[in-house]
Image (cartoon, rainbow, N blue to C red):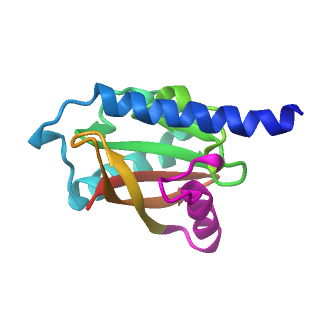
């Protein structure tokens, strides 16, 4: 029974965290990050994680820190277990199962990323997500790099 309830609870929790982020966000032209900004942020995070490993996670979890830039933020998922290890927008997700995260089209987007990451060390996925700057569903692309046993990622709105 508990194995059935846990995924439902995690999905509910993830949905509430996304809703909370959308409610707290303030629309601003400076909050929109470009693809180039996302690539720079990803590269910065990859360098830090390559050098410091899990010791870099507190810096990534800092919502006002160097790994959050407007609507862009870094998140880290375990390549083998699919758990969130760091999340620049919602540190409360750390330790939860990222594989159950659904987009509005009911696609398991992190599961797709995990599948791609097992085939190659970098890539991207595109999906629909609620943009906290506009409060509307919008196309989003997330770029990722594999660093050891972690998938490091940053998403941007298209």
Instruction: Residue at 59%, 65% (x, y): give it.
Output: 117
Report the quarter where the C terminus lies.
Answer: bottom left
Q: Give the answer, above or below, for where 132 lies relative to 157.
A: above
Instruction: Residue at 86%, 31% (x, y): give it.
Output: 2
Give the x, y percent position of residue 112: 59, 64
Quadrant of the rendered image containing residue 26: top left
Give the x, y percent position of residue 153: 45, 52
Region rendered in magenta:
100-122
Q: Does the image show residue 45?
A: yes
- From the viewer's perspective, is 78 left or right of 135? right
Give the x, y percent position of residue 109: 54, 58
Q: Does the image show residue 147?
A: no
Report the quarter where the N terminus lies.
Answer: top right
Is 114 in the magenta?
yes
Give the x, y percent position of residue 44: 34, 48
Closest to the observer: 25 or 136? 136
Is 108 in the magenta?
yes
Instruction: Residue at 30%, 25% (x, y): give it.
Output: 24
Instruction: Residue at 47%, 53% (x, y): give it.
Output: 104
């Amino acid at each position: 029974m508990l194995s059935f309830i846990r995924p439902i609870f995690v999905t509910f929790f993830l949905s509430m965290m996304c809703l909370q982020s959308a409610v707290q966000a303030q629309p601003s032209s400076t909050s929109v990050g470009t693809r180039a900004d996302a690539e720079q942020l990803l590269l910065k995070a990859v360098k830090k994680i390559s050098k410091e490993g899990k010791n870099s996670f507190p810096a990534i979890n800092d919502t006002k820190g160097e790994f959050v830039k407007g609507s862009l933020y870094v998140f880290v998922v375990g390549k083998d277990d699919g758990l969130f290890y760091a999340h620049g927008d919602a540190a409360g997700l750390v330790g939860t199962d990222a594989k159950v995260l659904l987009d509005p089209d009911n696609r398991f987007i992190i599961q797709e990323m995990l599948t791609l990451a097992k085939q190659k060390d970098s890539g991207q996925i595109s999906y629909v997500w609620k943009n906290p700057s506009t409060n509307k569903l919008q196309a989003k692309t997330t770029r990722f790099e594999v660093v050891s046993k972690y998938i490091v990622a940053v998403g941007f709105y298209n």
